[in-house]
Amino acid sequence: MKKQLVISVMSKDRPGIVADITGVILDLDGDLADLNQSVLGGYFTMILIAEFDEQVTPEDLFAKLSHIKSENKIEATIQEMPLPLDMEKDKLPGETFIVTAQGENRKGMVKIMGDFFFDRNINILDLVTTRNQQMYTMIFQVDLSNIDSIGVLRQELETLAGRENLDLVLQHNDIFRATHEIGTPFGSSTE
Amino acid sequence: MLRSDQIMATVEMVQKENLDVRTVTMGINLLDCRRGSAKATCDRVESKIAENADRFVATCEEIAQKYGIPVVNKRISVTPASFVGAGFKRKDFVSLAKSLDRAAEKAGVDILGGFSAQVEKGITKSDKEYIDSIPEALAETERICASINVGSSQKGINMDAVAMMGKTIKELAEQTADNGGFGAAKFVVFCNQPGDNPFMAGAIHGVEEADVVLNVGVSGPGVIARSLEKTIKRRGRENLRLDDIAEEIKQITFRVTRCGELIGRQVSRELGVEFGVVDLSLAPTPKIGDSVGEILQILGVDAVGAPGSTAIVALLNDAVKKGGVFASKAVGGLSGAFIPIMEDAILADAAGKGTLTLEKLEALTCVCSVGLDMVPIPGDVDADTISAIIADEMAVGMVNNKTTAARLIPVPGKTVGEVVSFGGLFGESPIMKVLNVNKSGRFVAWGGRIPAPIHSFKN
């Protein structure tokens, strides 16, 4: 019997973090599945899924991760997940859109957008924000499968833009794929 | 994973640089509309267009709304009228034009192209009837565009047809004199006319095409102009050379083409209609900031038409093709930069100032698409001179294995420097000077054919 653990780690970025963490997983005879890592402002964060034998506990793993010798502490959170994981959920739905929002930096900007999406049962699939001097930019990848009318949503975004003094643009995800990927998002000729 | 720089670049292109899809054109084959009488044929033409195009405009608008990219023009092209109406008399062709006009109105499109004929080698009796019908047909309809192919690289130039064109264009302008000779703006004479061009006035649904096809024209020159300005500002003029400029044009064209094809294919999927081609042509509009002439200014000529202009257009045209061909699964139509005087505010201005002459325009057409387009000339220029200008332009296309065309508008009662305005997408311009008027009659009078050029011995 196997068990699946989801591990999230964070640390100040330096060479060797991936080697250290995957070394611990290998020591416990773990089999690594999907992994995502990202670096933001000099800080490293990673989320990964690995399969272990039944007797390996999250505590064992946590103890081993804590013993990694490093100038900066590696923080880790571990959760056991039911098998099997639904990786199909990671595929983008057909109605994936991108909403970009820009405005002069102030507190609560992401919350404004978060509330707007939540009120309409819109799930945020991915989110990137950047602050460049006084300009704050948010890019939301959202699933609009629950939206009946894109036209109405556009009007609502326009109202929000006026009220909150934001520059809001809604566009289909395929537009970005079409303009930046070599492969075409058009499907095959026989489709 | 989201790449914020790429996403913001695309957002900027759509929002600030006015990226759009210039036209989605539905081509409809009308050959199976032939019935026992002209009346029954015309009726079937109207019903067939209605059957195929009833959801066309609404679907284009839905897809544009969903993707956040406007589709500026929705048009229809049909099988050349001379084939549909083979054996028709002049009055029957006028009736056919009126039927097409009604069908276009019902479908909600502003222009329908294909009141056309192909006479590059010989003219049939019904072709003659068709040509005779053009002035009345275009004067009495609102939405119909006509075109005629009088030459090709394979067959040569039919000079009998060219001789008729001067007279036809003059008469067409006279019949629409109240509106500055506007009828002539809806009629274009071609060499090597393609059957899948989505742009008006020269769109037809070629006989080689499937029953119903959607062709798409990509966004205009404005996007390229804005992008070039931004690049020059960001990188500094002193750090750029022409190969960098060509590369920038290629990249922006790649994106523009991809957007056009994405929208076009979605519309065709929604309608269950075959997708045809993406036409890469840069089609200017009279709107400020949507001009091919402006790109010439950005790239370094202080007056459009000054020496260097032809080289710049050559660079532009080639880079547009290279970026677009790689982006698209199916490229066709005209696919080059247009230089329509009246439809391009900067070109019109240059024509008014005299920096851009008819002769320089002819030179430009050697390196771009499509020809002497939307050129207003004095109303008193004689028919033979008009025919001879057309012959020159056809020769450029025939010898260079490319499409060329002439859309000349002899504006009744007006002369050089006076302004003619048709409004909307047809624009306005001061009337251009024609040199050597009344000096080509003996040439045009020969008739016959200019033989096709030799296609070997290329050294």
Image (tube, rainbow, N blue to C red):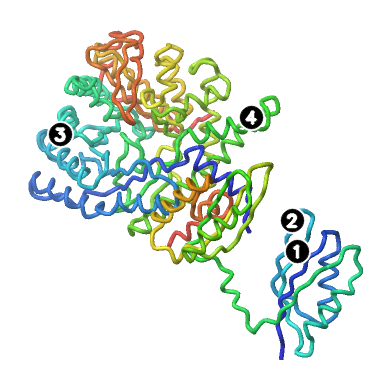
Specify few, some or many for label 3: CA neighbours under 10 Å numbering under 14, 14-19, or 20 or more.
few
Whether labels 1 and 2 share one chain = yes
Task: Tell me which chain the residue with mark 4 is part of.
Answer: B
Residue B339 image offset from top left, x and y in percent: 42, 26
Relative vertical location of residue A161 with respect to residue B293 in this rendering, above or below:
below
Whether labels 3 and 4 share one chain = yes
Which quarter shows the C terminus of chain B? Answer: top right
Helix, strand or loop at disc 3?
helix
Relative depth, front residue between B154 and B282: B282
**Residue to which mark 3 is pinned:** B125
Under mark 1, the amino acid is Thr
Residue B406 image offset from top left, x and y in percent: 33, 25
Relative depth, front residue between B90 and B257: B257
Closer mark to the observer between disc 3 and disc 4: 4
Which quarter shows the N terminus of chain B? Answer: bottom right
Whether labels 4 and 1 share one chain = no
Label 3 vs label 4: CA separation? 60 Å
Helix, strand or loop at disc 1?
strand
Relative depth, front residue between B97 and B19: B19
Residue B444 image offset from top left, x and y in percent: 27, 16
Helix, strand or loop at disc 2?
strand
